[in-house]
Image (spheres, rainbow, N blue to C red):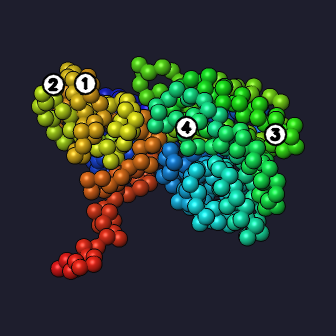
Amino acid sequence: MTPITEQDGVWRLDGVDLHALADAVGTPTYVYSSATIRARIAELQQAVRGLDARICYAVKANPNLAVLALMAHAGLGADIVSGGELQRALRAGIPAQRIVFSGVGKTEAEIVAAVEAGIWRFNIESRDELHLLCRVSSRLGTLVNAALRLNPDVDARTHAKISTGRAQNKFGVDRDEAWRCFADAAECAYVRLDGLHMHIGSQIVELDPFREALGHVAGFRKELDAAGYPVRSIDVGGGLGVRYALHAPAPVPVQDYADAIRSAFADFDGTLVLEPGRWLVADAGILLTRVIRVKPGAERPFLILDAGMNDLLRPALYDAWHGIVPLHAREASTRRYDVVGPVCESSDTFAVDRDLPMCGAGDLVAILGAGAYGASMASTYNSRPLPAEVLVDAGCHAVVRERQTVEAMLAGEAARGPGIEPAP
Ligand SMILES: *Cc1c(COP(=O)(O)O)cnc(C)c1O
């Protein structure tokens, strides 16, 4: 849960007064706590101590350059899924040699860019991609490292839309295809396929799905080894869940997760790779928003915020539950609300029938646990400019992404076309 605090009516995150911040920067604004991110990094590094393990932060969870710079300073690498994320990671100071590239739809241009940048390894998701990587690396005369993503057909018991390790999901390959890939790679002088990769889903709160998938990969590693395909790195993906709600089951403690990895690969002497995204940043962020108005409803009033599903998509997309805290000076009597945004969709709903302190127009509200898959999934739907992003640390704040202007949102468009006269 995001560590916002209240003292004498002043709400703060990392010592920064959130009312003053909202006055200065406006709303809606994402606010990230550096201290929380640093603490999470340290906790994970502590949990894997003694292992030959590299942590490659999954950029898509929160790709803000300042957040990536925090990761870079802590010595983390990056797990990227596009050419755009490659540029972000490099620009934030993450060395190419600490970057792994995942994803089922890498294009030739993206592969070329990553080979030329000299990334550490490609997480291959299909035989076709392997062949393309072979053609590109041979053409460029550059030896590349690769790992093969196995689809372990494990139910991560998370939301269907963030489950990635079932046979019917598009990710990874099954064992038969994996054997063919290793055989093909042996014929390619410029691809060193000596790793395995898995990632079974996101917001996983139980250990068993991880254990099952890790066991699957560990077993296959031994079979490969016996067949003369030595495996030097195993990437266990990400997926570790966080606690969005006190009423939700407690997620796997990070030490238990690390211990499961430790025991699954006790007899493996290569390098392990972890790709956490959400767990490092989700709790560190809030979405700061103001009440536009309260509207009576058939069942209960609507609390209409100036943040919408375009700013924070998770409730609409995944039925996600987020804590919602009105930042009132005093404890008010409570009321049940449907908390909604201004977007013209009924799915633009942050909470239904939520018991909250009474709110009125202009009140400031924090949506908690918004540090992961928040700003990164924001869009300009309804022509709403992208929100600002702020990093706070020990009482100081910095705007790390300016609020998008309408001018910037419209850049690249023009009111003309075939048969359309330019607008006056
Ligand atoms: C999204 C993703 C991650 C990170 O998942 P989290 O649930 O945010 O930890 C890691 N690896 C791959 C391949 C991913 O696609």
Q: Which residue is mark 3?
A: 224
Quadrant including the C terminus: bottom left
Residue type pointed to by label 4:
Gln
The residue drawn where x is 76% and y is 44% is: 179
The residue that appears at 20% across and 23% down in the rendered structure is 335
- Camera-near label (2 vs 4) is 4
Query: Above or below — where is 67 with respect to 248?
Result: below
How busy is the neighbourhood of tag 1: few (under 14 within 10 Å), some, or many (20 plus)?
some
Q: Which residue is mark 2?
A: 299
- Badge 2 amino acid: Glu
In the visual, does 106 lie left or right of 380?
right
Residue 238 percent location from the top left of the image? 60, 38
- Marks 2 and 4, how far apart at CA: 40 Å
- Residue 112 vs residue 368, the one in the foreground: 112
- The answer to whether mark 4 and mark 1 are in CB contact below 8 A is no
Q: Earlier in the sequence, mark 4 or mark 3?
A: 4
Residue 353 bears which disc, if any? Answer: 1
Kindly state the secondary structure of the residue where label 1 is placed. Answer: strand
x, y percentage for residue 27? Answer: 29, 47
Q: Which residue is mark 4?
A: 168
